[in-house]
Amino acid sequence: MGVDVHFFTDINNGPEETMKALNTIGAENITFLPPDYYAPEYSRISFSYKDENRMISFHGNSGAGYIGLPSHMLSLSAWGSAVEILEKLASMFGGVLDRNDCNTGNAELFQIPGHGSMRWMMEQYYAKNENTPSNYEEDLANFIKYCEKRK
């Protein structure tokens, strides 16, 4: 098992949206590899970026975390342009980017206005579950820590 770059994003940003975003950032030869029978939440997206042949592992609804916040996790092996690629997706979608899944303290929150931002996701969770956040900033910090611990 090697070092990976992880990106946690809103559950509405599925494989189709990810493929469109990859196309927007200049990826080519984008191919969706569907899940198999034994792992219905796991799929892959192969593509070329610059001179690299890459494969994103797409873990559907994998970031439930301590507050039950649904999110997808995208994972890339941490070599070449991995951080650059996922930073660009994070800037488009919003979410939490963990540049190195073997270390803590390097996750970064990417906020975008409106739908898709972590604040929006958490507000939707609170509204749906009729919970009042005790401390939004503390909950968000805990979710970022949760994302860093995923291996």
Image: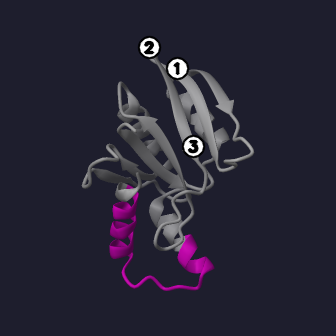
Q: Position of residue 122 (x, y in %)?
A: 50, 70
Cα separation, mark 1 vs mark 3, equals: 16 Å
Q: Position of residue 146 (x, y in %)?
A: 39, 63
Q: Is label 1 in contact with label 3 (beta carbons under 8 Å)?
A: no
Left or right of 20, for residue 53: left
Q: Nearer the viewer, residue 54 or 109?
A: 54
Picture residue at 54% right of the left edge, 39% below the top = 57
Cα separation, mark 2 vs mark 3, equals: 22 Å
Q: Is label 1 in contact with label 2 (beta carbons under 8 Å)?
A: yes
Q: Residue furthest top?
A: 51
Kind of element beneath mark 3: strand
Callout 2 amino acid: Asp
Against 144, residue 40 (above or below) is: above
Q: Quadrant of residue 50?
A: top left
Q: Which residue is mark 3?
A: 58
Q: Which residue is mark 2?
A: 51
Question: The N terminus is located in which quarter?
Answer: top left
Q: Position of residue 145 (x, y in %)?
A: 33, 63
Q: Which residues are magenta?
A: 124-147
Q: Which residue is mark 1?
A: 48
